[in-house]
Image: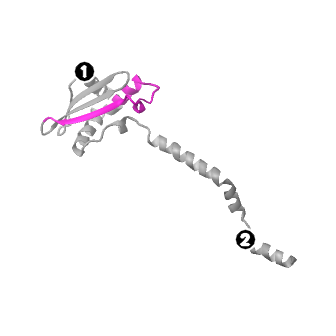
Amino acid sequence: MAKDKKKKEEDKPKKTGLKAFLKKRAPFYLAAIALIAISAQTVLSEKNFDNSLPELSKEEQRVADILLNYNAGVESKLTIKEVIKNQIDEEYPDEKIYEHKKTVLDLSVTNVNSDEYNVILNFKSYKGEMNFDWNVNVESQEITSNNPESKHIIDVVTFS
């Protein structure tokens, strides 16, 4: 009988150190992976200027890119998009303003004639709003402002 007990014990596979280690700690590892996934998801889903802009058609997006990436030549270090973002950040320094429920960033592109488009960017929040209005010539990539706020943005880009 003693021999039968030894054979039964030998037949049972012994738990290796790694399996036992993982079995004991698996819930902790799963919890850690879940926390990392949740924090990564919140970082990736954070709203900012770029992902707050509405979806545009291919042609409208091309016009918006010409406008927002305009930098008035080689000497300028800023683009129109950077100046607008800086202006919004100065107005709301310690807030995640794009995540606020009353914040709306609207961009509309309208064809004026074959080469010229009217681009209107409206930023509305609980404190007020900023309205920018430009005409963009796609062929020459010339940008003209239609209101004082837009003129100020172009001046900042040009003289930075």
- Specify the quadrant that holds the N terminus: bottom right
- Characterize the local packing of mark 1: few (<14), some (14-19) or many (20 or more) Cα atoms within 10 angstroms: few
- Quadrant of the image occupied by residue 54: top left
**Lower sequence index among marks 1 and 2:** 2
- Characterize the local packing of mark 2: few (<14), some (14-19) or many (20 or more) Cα atoms within 10 angstroms: few
- Looking at the image, residue 63 sits to the left or right of residue 48; the answer is left
Which residue is found at the position 45% from the left and 43% from the top? 44
Q: Which residues are magenta?
A: 84-112
Check disc 1 and report the residue beneath it: 148
In this view, the mark in front (1 or 2): 2
Total of numbered circles in the picture?
2
- The residue closer to the viewer here, 134 or 157, is 134
Note whether 147 is above or below 56 in the view shown: above
Q: Report helix, strand or loop for mark 1.
A: helix
Check disc 2 and report the residue beneath it: 13
Note whether 7 is above or below 103 in the view shown: below
Which residue is found at the position 22% from the left and 36% from the top? 109
Note whether 102 is above or below 31 in the view shown: above
Numbered badge on residue 7: none
Q: Position of residue 115 (x, y in %)?
A: 14, 39
Q: Amino acid at mark 2?
A: Pro
Q: Inspect the magenta stretch and tell me whether residue 36 lies in it.
A: no
Residue 114 in view in this figure: yes
Q: Position of residue 83 (x, y in %)?
A: 34, 29
Q: Residues under labels 1 and 2: Cα distance?
A: 81 Å
Q: Report helix, strand or loop for mark 2.
A: loop
- Quadrant of the image occupied by residue 117: top left
